[in-house]
Image (cartoon, rainbow, N blue to C red):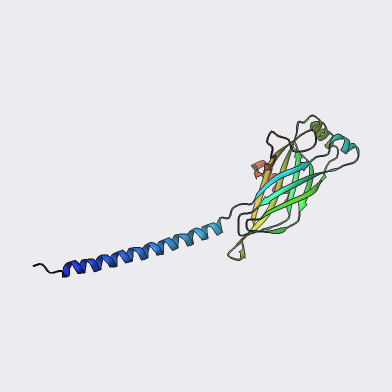
Amino acid sequence: MPSPCPNFTDEIFTSEARSLCVSLLRFFSALAILAFCIWLSLHPNQPSFTVVDLSVPTSNNIQNGSSSLTYELEIQNSNSGVYYDDILVTFFFGQDPVADDVISSFYQGKDKTHHVRQDAKAKNTQIWSGVARAVANATAQLKVSLATQVRYKTWGKKSKHHGLNLEGVVPVGSDGKISGKKKNKKIKLHHASGKRKAFKKHHYKV
């Protein structure tokens, strides 16, 4: 009659091997999660900037002495926290800058949405006659240029500075507002082209 000892020994070794595999699996899973968290902290998501409202002076307003436009930015952050330096916002008509503004530095918490509504002062009132004609014909387009530096909050500390150079094109109707077929008329800014980025770096160090 064969002895049961070999089977019992095999079961012990099999149980120990299974336990070892489970322990190793848990260890490498925890290691992978930690590595992923570290990767996320070193590669934060860039905040998004969207023009949600714009009010451009019409020809009548320009004749009455209005020399600024009103804009509203929506800034969304999905990171632990973001520290913004001053944000330079410039509006172009063709290649000519027509108005600019500076948004003061601020801190934005995790998963927060920040709205900024301010006036951008005219840079060259002579160019505004061309803007007014284009607005009256409902053919105006303004390029929005944004430049700033941000530091991300990672592991309770501030990261190094990261430069942001963004731009977008805003169509303007005859009423001086954002035009378009969509009911929800918003313009999300995207990474600037090399030429525009070089211009911004020259005027605003990022």
Residue at image point 67% right, 44% down: 189
Residue at image point 33% right, 63% down: 21
Question: Which residue sits furthest front?
Answer: 1
Q: Nearer the viewer, residue 16 or 93?
A: 16
Q: Position of residue 6 (x, y in %)?
A: 17, 68
Question: Which residue sits furthest left?
Answer: 1
Q: Position of residue 92 (x, y in %)?
A: 75, 40
Q: Quadrant of residue 139?
A: top right
Residue at image point 64% right, 41% down: 193
Q: Quadrant of residue 15?
A: bottom left
Q: Position of residue 147 (x, y in %)?
A: 70, 49
Horizontal side of 164 relative to 29 (left or right) equals right
How many numbered tags mark residues here?
A: 0
Asked if residue 142 can be seen in this view, the reply is: yes
Q: Quadrant of residue 176?
A: top right
Examine the rendered structure and indicate whether residue 9 appears above or below residue 76.
Answer: below
Question: Which residue sits furthest right?
Answer: 64
Examine the rendered structure and indicate whether residue 121 appears above or below residue 84.
Answer: above
Q: Position of residue 159 (x, y in %)?
A: 61, 61
Asked if residue 205 can be seen in this view, the reply is: no
Q: Point out the image quarter for the N terminus.
A: bottom left
Examine the rendered structure and indicate whether residue 123 appears above or below residue 85.
Answer: above
Horizontal side of 57 relative to 159 (left or right) equals right
Horizontal side of 51 relative to 6 (left or right) equals right
